[in-house]
Amino acid sequence: MVFKKRAENNGEIDPRINVQGRVRNPNGEKILTKRAVRDKELLSLLRKIKPHLSDSIMTAAKIMKNEDASHMSQLKAATILLNAYKELINDAYNGEDPEEEATDVQPNTPVFSLKMINTDRVEKVG
């Protein structure tokens, strides 16, 4: 199915060509892309898991300090804690080099400036 040229179609656009733009749902909502659906589901899962993070870290710390736990369990708990710490540090610095020159959060620029409107009139003080 090849579209017809305008010259072959009396100067008109082939009616099979969509000139209306992207097709939307009948109720007017945007059609979600696969990426948007995936991001939405991931965010939902993260919100469900977040309240249990502190409990899991405390459990790992208890296992690591427990003398009755096997050495393998203690080592695994220590690894979990170290990985969590490393991820937090990476998130805090956004993966940037801490020795890089930083930019000021609030640069030293004037907040406002004053400008004389009427310069013809001179006022004497005193």
Image (cartoon, helix red, strand yellow):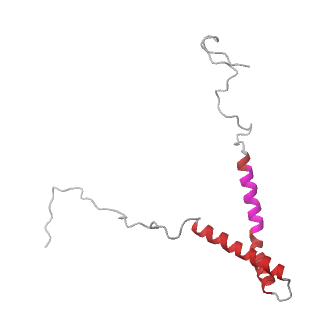
Toward which corner of the image does residue 4 lie, by quadrant?
top right
| Coordinates of residue 96 in the picture (x, y in percent) | 55, 65
Using residue 117 as the reference point, say whether residue 20 is left or right of it: right
| Coordinates of residue 116 in the picture (x, y in percent) | 24, 58
User: Residue 42 lies in magenta, yes or no?
Assistant: yes
Compared to residue 113, the image places residue 23 above or below, namely above
In this orientation, which residue lies closer to the viewer: 70 or 45? Answer: 70
**Residue furthest toward the front?**
71
Compared to residue 95, the image places residue 9 above or below, namely above
Q: Residue at x 59, y 13 (%)?
A: 11
- From the image, give the main secondary structure of the stretch colored magenta: helix
| Coordinates of residue 84 in the picture (x, y in percent) | 70, 72
**Residue furthest toward the bottom?**
67
In this orientation, which residue lies closer to the viewer: 31 or 2? Answer: 2
Q: Residue at x 76, y 55 (%)?
A: 41
Q: Read off the magenta span.
A: 37-49
Quadrant holding the C terminus: bottom left
Compared to residue 124, the image places residue 55 above or below, namely below
Q: Residue at x 75, y 75 (%)?
A: 79
In this orientation, which residue lies closer to the viewer: 74 or 114? Answer: 74
What is the total number of numbered labels drawn onto the structure image? 0
Toward which corner of the image does residue 40 lie, by quadrant?
bottom right
Quadrant holding the N terminus: top right
Q: Residue at x 86, y 88 (%)?
A: 68
Using residue 26 as the reference point, say whether residue 97 is left or right of it: left
| Coordinates of residue 109 in the picture (x, y in percent) | 37, 64
User: Residue 40 lies in magenta, yes or no?
Assistant: yes
Toward which corner of the image does residue 49 lie, by quadrant?
bottom right
